[in-house]
Amino acid sequence: MRANILRKMIITAAWASIAAIAYATMARVGFVYSVYFKLSPILMRPEMRTYAHFEHAVAFAVFGALFYLAYRRHIVLVCCLVFGSAVILEFLQTLTPDRHGTIVDAAEKIAGGAAGIFAARVLMSFRTNNRYGSMN
């Protein structure tokens, strides 16, 4: 029962993460700057562009990891969803008046998503190996 509740929480967090990423991607640029100015002191005041690179990679790493944990048996679907979201959101960003999508940003998001999927997969393989290894 506990595992079922945890799984539902992970699924909810995964879908909430893509909703939050989509909102941040499509919101006016002022929203992005307001988040940057609030986080900047905590992150040792990086340049805005450095922050953007970091934010793209981290957001999609979390997104990829959550979707892998939620749908481990459907790795191809997870990869298509994570990588496709990066490309689609960057394309949609080109349709907004004050934002611009770039190939570099899409690549950063894809790399972050791949890193998150890989990290979650490694974590789960260690967990599985430790569980079965301790029984021997």
Image (cartoon, rainbow, N blue to C red):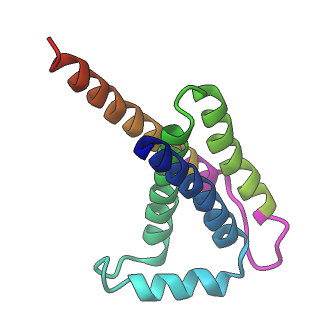
**Horizontal side, residue 65 vs residue 134: left or right:** right
Residue found at x 83% / y 78%: 97
Residue most extreme to the top: 136
Residue found at x 48% / y 82%: 36
Residue found at x 48% / y 49%: 5
Front residue of this view, candidates 18 and 15: 15
The magenta segment: 93-108
Position of residue 91 measured from the top left corner of the image (x, y, whole percent): 78, 56
To which quarter of the image does residue 38 belong?
A: bottom left
**Horizontal side, residue 91 vs residue 8: left or right:** right
The N terminus - image quarter: top left
Instruction: Tell me if residue 112 can be seen.
Output: no
The C terminus - image quarter: top left
Instruction: Tell me if residue 123 can be seen.
Output: yes
Position of residue 49 measured from the top left corner of the image (x, y, whole percent): 49, 71
Residue 105 located within the stretch drawn in magenta: yes
